[in-house]
Image: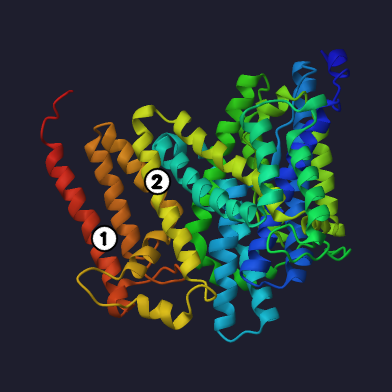
Amino acid sequence: MEQRAQKYKWFVLGDLNGFFGLIFDNLTVLSFLAGILIFVFKFPADIVYTKMFPGTALGVLFGDLVYTWLAFRLARKTGNQNVTAMPLGLDTPSTIGIALVVLGPCFIAMKSSGLGEHEAAMMTWYVGMATMVMIGVIKVVFSFFGNWVQRIVPQAGLLGSLAGIGLALIGLIPLVDIFGMPVVGLIALGIVLYTLVAEIKLPRNVPGVLAAVVLGTALYYILGPLGLVGGGTFAAPPVEFHVGFPVPTLGFLHGLIPALTYLPLAIPFGILTIVGGINVTESARVAGDDYKTRDILLTEGFATLIAGLCGGVAQSTPYIGQPAYKRMGSRAGYTLLTGIVIGLGGMLGAVSFVVEVIPRAVLAPILVFVAIDIMVQSFQACPPRHAPAVAFAFFPTIARLLAIKLGNPDVVPVENFLRLLSVPGKALPEMLVTIALGNGFIITAMLWGGFLAELIDKHIRRSVVYLVILAGLAFFGIIHSASPDGSMYLPWTLSGLARQIPYQFATAYLLLGGLFLFLSFRKIQAE
C-alpha cells in the first residue's frame, strides 16, 4: 500500500480545469464583497483592499493547504491514486449577506453616530472581524454537533433558508449587474449557462468559466471605449496593487460589543456551513473519497477563525461540487494552486487588481449559476412533499432585500423613510412590517421552513414547538426586530408603533400555536 501511495499523482491536467473553476468562484465573491461595500455603501476602497482582503485570503490559503494535505493523507492511507481534494473557498451566501446586512449598515450607523468616514470604516472593520471570530468559534463548537442539528431541523428549513439567500441576494443582485452591461454580461451568462447548467462542452474542452470571463472582459475593453457598453462611460482601472499583510491582532475586541447586535446573523451563517460541510463530505464519500467529517468541519472552522483574527470579514467553507471536480480529473493540485494564488494574491494586491480589472457584469454570471444550483438542490434534496416549506422559507430573505434597498438614503431619503415607519392606520405600517420581516431573516427562514415541514408531515405538536420558539425570539427582536438596524431589545423600551411589533408578533405566534395544539387532539383522517 505504501508503494502504491507513492505513485499518487497529485497534479494532473484536470487540476487546471479545477483551478480555473475554484479560483474564479473566489474572485467573484471577493469582487461582489468589494463592489457592495465600495459602490453601494461608499466604503473607503483602501480599507477593503488592504485591511479586509488580506485576512480573508489568508483563511482560504490555510483551508486549501489543509485540504490538500488531507488528500495526500487519504491517498497514503487507502492507496487510491485518484483522490480529489475537498474544494474550499469563500462562502458565497454569507459573504454577500454579511456585506449587505452587517458591514454596510454598520458603516452607515457609525457615520450617523458622528464618526468620520475613515473612523467609521475602521470601526466597521473591527465589527466584521469580531463577527468572523464569533462565526469561527460557533463553527468549531458546532462541528461536534453538526449531525445533531441536521437531525433536529428538517432539510426544508436548512436548505430553504439558503435557497432564499440564493434567490434574493446571490441571484437577483448579480442579475442587475449583468443587465447593467447587457452586451458583455449576457454573453458571459450565456456561456456559463451553456457549459455549467446545460453541461455542453466548449471546443477543445475549454473551461466554461474561463471562457466566459476572458470573452466578457475582452468585449468590455473593446466596446467600452466606443461607448457601446452600459451607460456609455468607460474608464480603464488604474494599474495599482493594494498591498496589505494579515497580521494577528486583537482589534476585533473593539468591535465585539457592537457585533453582538448581529449575533442572530452570525449563528445561522455558521451553522449553515457546518451542515453544508456534512453534506459535502457525504457527497465526496459517495464519489469515492472517504474523508472524516470532523476533519473537514474543523478545518473550515479554524480557517474562518484565523481569517477573523487577521482582519478577514468573510468565512470559508468546503464547496458543494467535490464530485464535479473529481469528474474534471482534478486531484490535489487545484486546491494547492487556488490557496496560493488567492492567499498571496490577496496580500500582494494582485487579487484586488484583478477584481478591479474584470467588470462585475462578467463575474456576476458565476453567482447566478451558484444561486440556481442552490435553489435547485434545495428542492431536489428535500422530500417532494416539503417543496411548499422550502418555498415558504424564501420570503424573509426577500423582505430583507427590500429593507436594504428602501433603507438606502440614496433611494429613499432618511426623513421619508422614518415617516413611513410610523404612518398610523388600521394595519401596522407597511415599511415597519417589511423591516421586521427581514430582520433576523436567516433564523426566521429556518424556523418557518421547519415549522411548515413538520405541519406537512402531520407532526402538529412539533410544529407548535417551532411557533413557541418564533414567539420567544420575536419578543426580544432576535427575529422580526422593529429597529431598522435589526438590533435586539427589551420590548418595553420601545416607543410608538414599533412597540407593537414584538407584542403583536409574539402573541400571533402563540395564538396560532395554541390553535394547533388544540387541533392536535383531533384524529387526522388519512387521505
Three-letter amino acid code of the residue under disc 1:
Ala
Quarter of the view holding residue 188:
top right
Q: Is residue 414 left or right of residue 354?
A: left
Quarter of the view holding residue 494:
bottom left
- As helix, strand or loop, the secondary structure at mark 1 comes to helix
Q: Is residue 344 left or right of residue 465?
A: right
Q: Give the distance between the C-alpha atoms of the residues marked 2 and 1, in whole angstroms.
A: 19 Å
Quadrant containing the C terminus is: top left
Three-letter amino acid code of the residue under disc 2:
Ala
Q: Residue furthest bottom?
A: 114
2 vs 132: above or below:
above
Quadrant containing the N terminus is: top right
Q: Position of residue 489 (x, y in %)?
A: 38, 71
The residue wearing badge 2 is 393
Q: Position of residue 12 (x, y in %)?
A: 86, 25
Q: Position of residue 320 (x, y in %)?
A: 62, 35
How many numbered markers are drawn? 2
Q: Position of residue 523 (x, y in %)?
A: 11, 30
Dot 2 or dot 1: first in sequence order is 2
- Identify the residue at horizontal 48%, vertical 79% (top origin): 413
Q: Is residue 181 left or right of residue 527?
A: right
From this viewpoint, is residue 72 visible?
Answer: no
- Identify the residue at horizontal 88%, vertical 17% (top origin): 7
The residue wearing badge 1 is 506
Q: What is the crowding at mark 1: few (fewer than 14 residues within 10 Å), some, or many (at least 20)?
A: many
- Identify the residue at horizontal 73%, vertical 25% (top origin): 201
Q: Residue furthest left?
A: 522
Q: Nearer the viewer, mark 2 or mark 1?
A: 2
